[in-house]
Amino acid sequence: MSSRSITIALALVLMFAICTPARPNTLSSINNSALRQYTEQELERGAPSMGTTSRILYREALQLLERGEWETARERLLLAAELSGDYADPLFTLARVELMHAHPDFLIYLVDGINRLARNYRSQSLIALNTMFLLVVSALGALLVILVTLLMKYWPLIDHKLREGYRKKAAFPPASWIGLLIIIGFLFMRLGIALYSVILVIALWPLATRKEKGVVATLVILVAAISFASGYINILVPAIDPGSITGRLALISERGADERTIKRIREINDPAFYAEKEFVLGTSMYRLNYLEEARRHFLTAVSKRKDFAPAYLNLGNVYFKQGDYDKAIAGYQSVIALDSTNALAHFNIGQTYIKKMLFAESSSMLKRANTLGIEKYRESHPAVTIRGLTIYEAELSTRELWSIAYREGRAHPARIFSEVLQPYLLFPFHRLWILLAVTMVMAAVVGKRIPKSWRAFRCDNCSMAACPECASSETGLHLCKSCASTIDGLTSVKVMEALLRHRRQKMSTKTGTRSAWRFIIFPGAPCIGHGKTTTGMVVALLNVGALMLLICNGFYFKDPQVIVLSTPLWKYIVPPVFMLLSWVLSARARVQSESRNYRILPAEMHIDRQGSKQAGGGNEAEKKSEQLEALLNSL
């Protein structure tokens, strides 16, 4: 056999062994003739993925699932997943269907769906933007809930001091009204959540415990940090703006080339994105087979950006189609010089070597392409397999789109969170960190500068409000007027403790009954009121976040290019479960019951009273105390 025959035989073997195997015509599985025709047109226009077709098939699959046609729906879901490389919903639904049928494949579909979300720019941006928004709303809501809870907890102290101070200056309106009138006045002023939070932090800081201050400071720092970084959050905005430069340039990765898309790209006038614009126009012309025009656009792109690897690769593709294989290889080699791990460049060089009858070099390059992950490209670009392409084209990668979004977002004057939260905060969110920083400084200064004579405190026995002007300290404890009058004139320590304990338990029962409803309105409030401050913060965050998810039906910011076909099951289940959990945790919060033999009076009083009793000293008050003590002992 001649060497020429051996060469031809080797070429045939390599073509069958290395080249992409042809699959059955996937489009024939599409029953809708109009949809199949549209999909074929998209393939002719060079679409790398059939996202629209996939979404329509997904809708049909959901309708089949509602009718109970599991097997047919499963086939439709598999087809929808196969036709799109970045649409994850069919895979998540497949995972749910397989899990309900106790099939182990559900885990494979679930992982594949998560991978699709993780590698797609638009999905990454939407998830990041909604996560940040959910976090800031949850933090703001939890901060407001905790401050209102602390206000209810310490309101008796504040109200007591307001009454004491007002009573000395005026007789009308009654002193009992003054606190309520102040609250109503602040509410009618409609200052916004930002200023209300500031007022509450400054007013409550001197009264709060160390743990409560820590929780408030934690939430304030979290909100302030997001506010400070709100300018960087702008890089996430292009994903939800259909008119953004990033969104228009990303169309090259989502659909085929047509006149409408090309017109939208040509309308980009920002010189900062000139190279990317030329690249996308060149790729569109390449897909429409306008090779000379595509070559000019690619040459312009690489002249503006010397490190533009996708432009070099697609320029090589133009030369490949024109039959200039040496220039094609030169274009691919430029890509490898910039990125030695580029699987597309190695694969295209391997295909070009086959055209040049360099089979050994081709085999080496194709193996290298397989090692670098050419199969991942095929999975995310199903059209290359359906169309049986010889060489593969590059698009704007997720990393490139993030870079474009960063440049576009930094130049955008408006802040997305400020626009959304302005009606509720009545203060620019991107400036909120300054206000919060000043608030914390003022709260610390006010907490240190308030004289002790101005501060109200709780009675050491019944925890009712008291102040230095009305409290009694004769027993070594700070007792309110009611507790002091309860033991006035008594000398028996046991009787005094019994009467104080009785009053304490009575007031504790009354207070517990009055505050039992709070967890229904403010989940987390009972935890904070009973000293479990960290748990209260977590419960409040959990409840506000779940409520936000329920109100927004999942994401607050939606993808404008995707029609919502149905609401995923998790959006109905997760928020109510989290809200129920927060209510259960709040309902379980209880004050620890005191010991039956708990003593309120100091130990030295017991010694002194016992000594005076043994000395035989006594009077009428002591006799009454002894009689009460004997009665208590008999009970």
Image (spheres, rainbow, N blue to C red):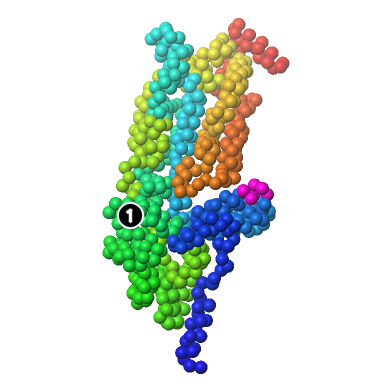
In this rendering, the count of numbered labels is: 1
Q: Tell me which secondary structure the magenta stretch mostly adopts.
A: helix
Q: Residue at x 56, y 57 (%)?
A: 33
For residue 617: magenta?
no
**At 41% from the left edge and 35% from the top edge, which residue is drawn?**
421
| Residue that extends furthest to the bottom in the rendered view of this protein | 1
Q: Horizontal placement of 193 versus 569: left or right?
A: left
Q: Residue at x 59, y 45 (%)?
A: 569
Residue type at mark 1? Arg
Query: x, y (%) of residue 45?
Result: 44, 61
Q: Is residue 166 visible?
A: yes
Q: Nearer the viewer, residue 60 or 231?
A: 60
The x and y percentages for residue 620 are 60, 6
Residue occupied by mark 1: 266
Query: x, y (%) of residue 10?
Result: 50, 84
In the displayed structure, 45 sits above or below 458; it is: below
Q: Quadrant of the C terminus?
A: top right
Q: Secondary structure at mark 1?
A: helix
Q: Is residue 110 visible?
A: no
Q: Residue at x 56, y 45 (%)?
A: 566
In the rendered image, the vertical position of residue 119 relative to residue 609, given as above or below: below
Q: State whether residue 115 is above or below residue 15.
A: above
Please state the extent of the stretch shown in magenta in the rendering. Answer: 63-68
